[in-house]
Image (cartoon, coloured by chain):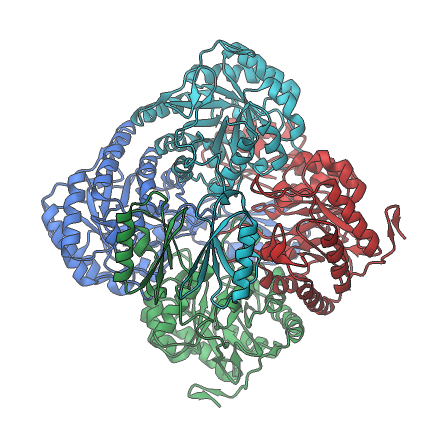
Chain colours: A blue, B green, C cyan, D red
Amino acid sequence: MMIIMKSNATPQQTEAVIASVKEAGLNVHLSQGVEATIIGAIGETHSIPLERFEGMDGVDVVQRITKPYKLASRQFHPEDSLVPLDGFHVGGEDIAVIAGPCSVEGRSQILETAQAVKEAGASALRGGVFKPRTSPYSFQGLGEEGLELLAEAREKTGLPIVAEIMSQVQVDVMVKYVDVLQVGARNMQNFNLLRAIGETRTAVLLKRGLSASVEELLMSAEYILAGGNNRVMLCERGIRTFETSTRNTTDINAIPVLKSLTHLPVILDPSHSTGYSEFVAAIARAGVAAGADGLIVEVHPDPAKAVSDGRQSLKPEAFAAMVKQVGQIAQVMGRKLATVQGEYSKNGWA
Amino acid sequence: MMIIMKSNATPQQTEAVIASVKEAGLNVHLSQGVEATIIGAIGETHSIPLERFEGMDGVDVVQRITKPYKLASRQFHPEDSLVPLDGFHVGGEDIAVIAGPCSVEGRSQILETAQAVKEAGASALRGGVFKPRTSPYSFQGLGEEGLELLAEAREKTGLPIVAEIMSQVQVDVMVKYVDVLQVGARNMQNFNLLRAIGETRTAVLLKRGLSASVEELLMSAEYILAGGNNRVMLCERGIRTFETSTRNTTDINAIPVLKSLTHLPVILDPSHSTGYSEFVAAIARAGVAAGADGLIVEVHPDPAKAVSDGRQSLKPEAFAAMVKQVGQIAQVMGRKLATVQGEYSKNGWA
Amino acid sequence: MMIIMKSNATPQQTEAVIASVKEAGLNVHLSQGVEATIIGAIGETHSIPLERFEGMDGVDVVQRITKPYKLASRQFHPEDSLVPLDGFHVGGEDIAVIAGPCSVEGRSQILETAQAVKEAGASALRGGVFKPRTSPYSFQGLGEEGLELLAEAREKTGLPIVAEIMSQVQVDVMVKYVDVLQVGARNMQNFNLLRAIGETRTAVLLKRGLSASVEELLMSAEYILAGGNNRVMLCERGIRTFETSTRNTTDINAIPVLKSLTHLPVILDPSHSTGYSEFVAAIARAGVAAGADGLIVEVHPDPAKAVSDGRQSLKPEAFAAMVKQVGQIAQVMGRKLATVQGEYSKNGWA
Amino acid sequence: MMIIMKSNATPQQTEAVIASVKEAGLNVHLSQGVEATIIGAIGETHSIPLERFEGMDGVDVVQRITKPYKLASRQFHPEDSLVPLDGFHVGGEDIAVIAGPCSVEGRSQILETAQAVKEAGASALRGGVFKPRTSPYSFQGLGEEGLELLAEAREKTGLPIVAEIMSQVQVDVMVKYVDVLQVGARNMQNFNLLRAIGETRTAVLLKRGLSASVEELLMSAEYILAGGNNRVMLCERGIRTFETSTRNTTDINAIPVLKSLTHLPVILDPSHSTGYSEFVAAIARAGVAAGADGLIVEVHPDPAKAVSDGRQSLKPEAFAAMVKQVGQIAQVMGRKLATVQGEYSKNGWA
């Protein structure tokens, strides 16, 4: 960490900053240039907030040299982390394809969808049961009933299940049913929830907030990792920008950037990142070509009847076509689509 | 709500949409133009999500005519809502000035600050006890001990207290101590929390999310209002944009826009919306000139020693100067600064 | 075009809007609903600005049904447009790869680069001679001397040349030398320049502005097309967002969106859209997987010595590896890399 | 300038960077810390682009200590610059109010408006004659005929005139007629135009680009100042963000930020920065309260008939009310509204 003093900083101000650096348990390396005095703060700086020094008199800029996260950093963990699911691992050679409806709406809907996406080549099933809805008047999800339906779908298809958790009070019931806890974009900085999930050992799909920076996403992952849960997958799902021709802007850059900064797997959600079913396949292909370790895609047997997100949901046929294309791109990348074992029981994969 | 069909939509697709509109309990007004067929959906549309129709085949665009919120809307509640605090109301003639440190750090710090801001003209005291921190390694707040210190500061100064709530599990303890529950930017769409707060009758300061639209802010207010708690104040605290010369971009436009759309009071937080203490007074003045009903400002007796947000905290003297300027602007606006009665007890204001 | 009146609009206001619609040469289709009166304006609406009606008393919202561009629209020109270069066409089966240095710096630099990118598989050579530099103190380009060097490089390699034009006063000299006039992001709405280029018949690479919407990009293309020059290629080069881990945010969504809205070819510039050489290949692959018709990439024999954009320039070896990968992705997409004939003379391709 | 080497940079790479710094005419101050080696580059660094070093092997980050502009910087010119107009100066005690229609549409329209804004208290007249229009089908302005009408309005009212210049080829005709050359947002980085204007001695109103940073705005001012023309006024006119409830987002923070960084006057354009006439007065008041040196406001005698920007234009009565409020805010700020002498002739103010 470097603390650059203002050109008109007094010696007393510089002394005060030096004292504060030492108080933080860091060593000081002083460099008095012509343009400015620079105080290098050396040691375990990742846990020291910049603001500790930014508010001091005479300080111009505080610049980090090392990143503010450690457990999530590739620097401290150079090999790719693998997150085990049913007979395959996310983050390795296999490309995971998670698919299913935005919301679990009923028994036949979820069983039918599960069967269809399994046949098309999906390796996991998604479905929302607690729904974060912008309007208090919208459908809020089936709750635990939905989880039971997901579990039934898993038994029938062998697909591991992914569902969104919205609050720390849901941890127990969610962990009982699901294979992957999804943290939605709106909860990426719900730190109480992150800490509670860090205490579990269930895999997590952590979605990037609507306007979260790549660094903030990694800091949120750090919360979970700090609790001892290292089964964390990151998910790019589009960011909010000025462009309105799509629902969000897919930050495709974030894929190679994240792969360079962290060892955690990176998943792309082309359904939310575009918002229109007709653009999903193109962006799914792009994601895998850019180096993503998997995809999460909304599929509904009858999008026009979906209670939520119908506009961005693929019909099963369109999803099957997408999976085929993605498989070919995976091959060019020296990878292949993951395949489930299909012999799952809640006591573990057979 | 108007549903504009694609120019090449088939009669069957149009029929299906019409059927779906009727199924939603709405009446249909069909208009077959040369460019496009338009289906008007008439009735209680605010509770119908656009996506209900957006996913249907042949639909081009769905456009709302009435807003998706109702309780928060000025159309249904033309008079300004007043939120009562100690002897004054927010949203009326009085301009509330809420001030205090980012975090409650200890007894002398909070008592000293409370006294200083009271003398300078503040009408409420803020202080964080559960802190949303980007890093798991940062100071996370004093918890209930901090609430007790705030209560003591209130007894000594008569200032009502404002503190941030981070999770629905904190509702009971927070309601026991504070006068205003602050919902932070990162929790603006924590719908479980909003619903829990809607069940209380404690006043709320709802901060706008980092990249939340004005409409989304009002939808989040609608969640609280729908629970029966109508003591909601909205807070503009800066949005995230490409500009990095300040921490956030103050969306000053949001002040007159909100005042036109809703009857709820609007507060500005110039500390977070700028991030630098040297710009706080200018933006505080601007906020009141633009029509804000109050300000919330970070003040710390020794910003250089603040455990958080030191860079944007005013020293008491600078705060006092700011209050004076803001008072003069308030006068031009035909308003005046709120003054507390100073005889508060937890059983109610004397 | 639909003009939605406010719920409290008077009959006189509605009458005035109707009169104004008729005055604009449009027909009126009136629809008096319960929620609002809607005035449909039917006819050649693409040339009528929304603001013509937005300022009128009683008007709530004006909504377009047809797009504000026509010549650029796929609706009026369903087949893909092909832009001919040396023995191949951009916009068809062939994927164009345009490569070269940010700036032409000298004879050996440009000749060496041209040779290297040709060998690696490039189908056109780029090089800046008039440079738009943020600072008045930076290198501003070699001007006409640079154009002569580019022409020499073309003679030696057969690669058509692409160079940026910054002002309408440069049209004559640029047209004399180059095969493709590049319009930079900062000039996307330099309407005088667009009009001047519309008068030529030289191919154009029109880059999207830093914060231009997809629709505004198409409106700028419309300027050139309206002048009679239909050899227009569009270029996504990254947009400005809050994310700072890359120089810009590649709007990968824009590729399928543009392909659906327009018949013009779409090129991706992964060098500017990422800003870091280590991310260029990943995003180049993603672009072709998303449906781009070509790439424009910065290559420099010694990026560390480049006078501009060294940080994002590929070395020739890295570029050659990228071309190989892109070729494989192209194959999956049912396409192939363009190859130049190599027998160019300024009188036309042999 | 500090060049931070990667932790795994080789001594050879460090040597190469040091050599490059010396080659650029700068002195080197080397600091070998535990985390990283830092190379301080000392001297006239404002004219050295960061990219000169960013592309070199082993370099992690390059950080400026001094700003990349000099003539525009308050550091090198601590006193406020005053730009003289008719009997008053912009940038001093007086608050300039520039008002008039978006476009000059005809003789009676501009003369009537000029008279009305003069009576209401305006100190200059604006009116567009060359119009930057997104659509090639929109009204493009009256050209020189419009300039003659503006000159006539000036003779009748004594108001100095402000009009937009769109291209370097218009410099001669514009300088002949206008008192202030307005550079529009879309041309803020039209460097050829900036350089041409730098050669004149006519006052300039330089508008911030739609997504230009504060620093880029100052760099564009530097272009004009570097040519010897120091009569530069900066104009905040709203930036593009995700928020769509207003046309743009007024970056009110930019006002105190610019006043701290530069000695040049800062003007606010609340018409473009909001886009809706009903919000203009609130934001105009906010601008002056935040420290702006003036306002530029669109006024039209009949906004519903305006050929452009009718939605954001004030009627003369509303403008007069706004001026009154702004005058009161100015007084609180220790300033007053500028008043024209009213005895102008093209040979200079009487």
Q: Is residue D332 visible?
A: yes
Residue found 80% across the figure and 48% down from its top = D151
Q: In this view, does B153 lie above or below C249?
A: below
Q: Nearer the viewer, residue B165 or D88?
A: D88
Question: Residue D186 at x, y = what percent?
Answer: 61, 42
Q: Is residue A280 left or right of residue B221?
A: left
Q: In this view, does C350 lie to the left or right of D227?
A: left
Residue found 68% across the figure and 60% down from its top = D291
Question: Residue C222 at x, y = what percent?
Answer: 52, 35
- Say which quarter of the image contains residue D312: bottom right
Outermost residue on the bottom side: it is B350
Q: Is residue A208 left or right of residue A295?
A: right
Question: Residue D272 at x, y = what percent?
Answer: 61, 53
Question: Residue A303 at x, y = what percent?
Answer: 25, 50
Q: Is residue B73 above or below residue C134?
A: below
Q: Is residue A174 above or below residue B334?
A: above
Quarter containing the N terminus of chain B: bottom left
Residue found 47% across the figure and 15% down from its top = C86
Q: Can residue D243 be seen in this view?
A: no
Outermost residue on the right side: it is D350
Q: Which of B239 and D286 is in front in this view?
A: D286
Q: Is residue C326 left or right of residue C209?
A: left
Residue found 59% across the figure and 33% down from its top = C194
